[in-house]
Image: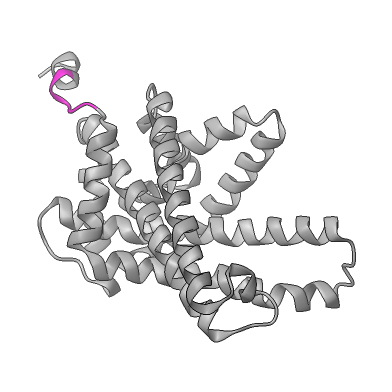
């Protein structure tokens, strides 16, 4: 079969299909999805607790400096954990695609074995996107779309740093507009969920997310962590479902040559 025929037989990229697979992954692999989501949500939440003490020790008294310091460090931690979570959950997504089981520990261990690579990708990717956002915003958005499946690629295909970014860029080639639309839909839905859920938390406990910082209270910490873990679970499942959809669109690609290495 020539390349033209293969391209014709490869499924097209559909936003509705990716969203359907996302909810399907959350429904069919709840322990893996929500377990990973809760695990990677905690470091950011805990960082918000220690942040005021650290700022005081560093003698940060300016509100602007403190806001920038807190925002950058919190964003970096969240970005690293997001990539690690994507790398972990791709194992469960692949197992669902093959109609077999994959437990939480199996899912997590696959990412742990690739942790140094995932950390490198997260640091380089976040730096590049941040730099792109500073440069008129649009370059940063384009980089975030082109590198949106770097975490799953690194674990699923066993690629190095450069190869991971190249592969992610190749998979997203020619569909950046549709990916942007998918991210807008995801962001709007996730934002609405977070707003409603946090309002419910405030009604029940009388304190919102700000109660996590100072003074610390276990009840809002638990509630807000659970609220955020649901949003995180959706985001992780979305990017893993997106990766599988893009690989299908690509006609299979290296994924089916490399994925079995996870379980060797």
Q: Residue furthest front?
A: 203
Q: 129 above or below 10?
A: below
Observer able to see residue 10: yes
Indicate left or right for 195 with 136 as reference. Answer: left
**Residue 167: where, in percent of width, then height?**
39, 36
Which residue is rendered at x = 41% and y = 71% of the image? 38
**Residue 156: where, in percent of width, then height?**
31, 51
Identify the image quadrant of the C terminus: bottom left
Q: Residue furthest bottom?
A: 218
**Residue 133: where, in percent of width, then height?**
66, 36
For the residue pair 6 and 218, the one nearer the viewer reads as 218
Observer able to see residue 264: no
**Residue 185: where, in percent of width, then height?**
40, 38
Which residue is rendered at x = 72% and y = 62% of the image? 70
Q: 145 above or below 122?
A: above
For the residue pair 18 and 9, the one nearer the viewer reads as 18
Q: Is residue 260 magenta?
A: no
Q: 210 above or below 100?
A: below
Which residue is rendered at x = 21% and y = 64% of the image? 29
Q: Main secondary structure of the magenta part?
A: loop
**Magenta-drawn segment:** 8-12
Which residue is rendered at x = 46% and y = 67% of the image? 200
């Amino acid at each position: 079969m020539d390349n033209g025929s293969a391209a014709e037989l490869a499924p097209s990229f559909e936003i509705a299909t990716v969203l359907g697979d996302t909810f399907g992954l959350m429904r069919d692999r709840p322990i893996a999805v929500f377990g990973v989501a809760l695990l990677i949500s905690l470091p950011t939440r805990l960082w918000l607790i220690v942040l005021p003490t650290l700022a005081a020790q560093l003698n940060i008294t300016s509100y602007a400096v403190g806001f920038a310091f807190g925002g950058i460090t919190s964003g970096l931690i969240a970005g690293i954990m997001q990539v690690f979570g994507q790398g972990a959950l791709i194992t469960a997504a692949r197992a669902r695609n093959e109609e077999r089981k994959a437990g939480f520990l199996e899912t997590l261990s696959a990412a742990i074995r690739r942790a140094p690579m995932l950390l490198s990708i997260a640091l380089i990717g976040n730096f590049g996107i941040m730099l792109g956002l500073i440069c008129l915003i649009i370059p940063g958005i384009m980089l975030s779309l082109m590198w949106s499946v770097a975490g799953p690629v690194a674990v699923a295909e066993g690629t190095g740093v450069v190869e991971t970014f190249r592969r992610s860029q190749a998979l997203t080639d020619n569909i950046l507009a549709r990916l942007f639309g998918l991210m807008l839909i995801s962001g709007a839905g996730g934002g609405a969920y977070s707003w409603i859920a946090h309002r419910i938390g405030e009604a029940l406990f009388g304190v919102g997310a700000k109660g996590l910082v100072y003074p610390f209270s276990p009840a809002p910490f638990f509630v807000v962590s659970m609220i955020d873990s649901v949003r995180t679970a959706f985001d992780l499942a979305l990017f893993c479902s997106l990766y599988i959809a893009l690989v299908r669109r690509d006609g299979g690609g290296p994924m089916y040559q490399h994925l079995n290495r996870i379980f060797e």
